[in-house]
Amino acid sequence: MSKIKFFIRQSWLLIVCSLFFGLLLAGANAVWTPRIQQNKIDKLNKLMSSLIPAVKKFQLAGTLTITSAKRKPIPTDLYKALADDGHCIGYCFNTAGPGFADKIELVFAVDRNFKKIAGFNVLSSNETPGFGDRIKQPYYRNQFAGAPAGRLRLEKTGDAKKIDSEIVAITGATISSEAVVDIVNNALPQVKKQMKQKGLIEDGN
């Protein structure tokens, strides 16, 4: 008996099981992928709405491509926030960058003239529980709401209630705090430049 025939005779059950479970996984993926994508869209809409409470609806204004600090392209969806009467009251966009433990995905909001940051929310993060994951807490996030939409600086100490370009780091989570500031500083100028090119904001802003 040849080695190939012997192998097939001895392992036919394993081969059949592998095919069966492979088809099962493929079927489950086909069924659940649309639901997972819809859940992510729902979460994004909820996070964006919390950043611009006066919004009536969000309208996709286009897809931008920003470059990470490591020169990798990051697809970025730009959403226009519309009020009841249909006029624009701000913009939201998603962006990402490296954190302490893994990639941090954020959704940011700015006013319609790109003068001030309306705030940010964490879309996805695996930062250390009790330390780095405190970037989701109001103590840290509130410092960005109303801050100028320019370059931000991370400070180890200071008045966290003062709204300006200085962001006070979270005690015990400096790396995660800095990661958020770095993501913002990398994304904001690139998004602003492309928004100007699209005519969404004036060159003078």
Image (spheres, rainbow, N blue to C red):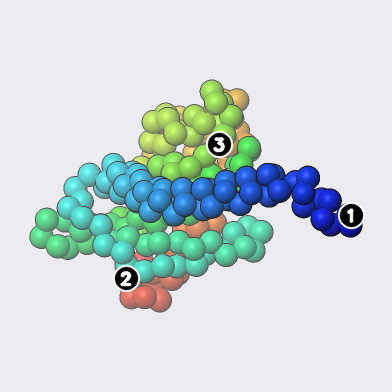
- Out of 166 and 128, give the one closest to the viewer: 128
Query: Residue flagged by tag 1: what amino acid is it?
Result: Met
Q: What is the x, y in percent for residue 172?
A: 60, 25
The crowding category of the residue bearing disc 2, from other C-alpha atoms within 10 Å (few below 14, some 14 to 19, many at least 20), is: some
Residue at the top extreme, as displayed? 130
Of the numbered discs 3 and 2, the one sitting upstream in the chain is 3
CA separation, marks 3 and 2? Answer: 34 Å
Q: Which residue is pictured at 41% across the width and 67% down the height?
A: 63
Q: Tell me: residue 87, above or below residue 183.
A: below
Question: SS at mark 1?
Answer: loop
Q: Which residue is mark 1?
A: 1
CA separation, marks 2 and 1? Answer: 74 Å
Q: Which residue is mark 3?
A: 126
Quarter of the figure with the C terminus: bottom left
Q: Which residue is pictured at 17% across the width and 53% down the height?
A: 56
Q: What is the x, y in percent for residue 81?
A: 25, 57
Query: Residue flagged by tag 3: what amino acid is it?
Result: Asn
Q: Which residue is mark 2?
A: 200
Would residue 156 be visible to someone looking at this image? no
Q: What is the x, y in percent for residue 174?
A: 60, 33
Residue at the front extreme, as displayed? 1
Q: Tell me: residue 155, above or below residue 148.
A: above
Q: Which residue is pictured at 58% across the width and 29% down the height?
A: 128
For the residues carrying marks 2 and 1, which lies nearer the camera in this image?
1
Quarter of the figure with the N terminus: bottom right
Query: Residue flagged by tag 2: what amino acid is it?
Result: Leu
Question: SS at mark 3?
Answer: loop
- Out of 4 and 71, give the one closest to the viewer: 4
CA separation, marks 1 and 3? Answer: 54 Å
Left or right position of 91 against 186: left
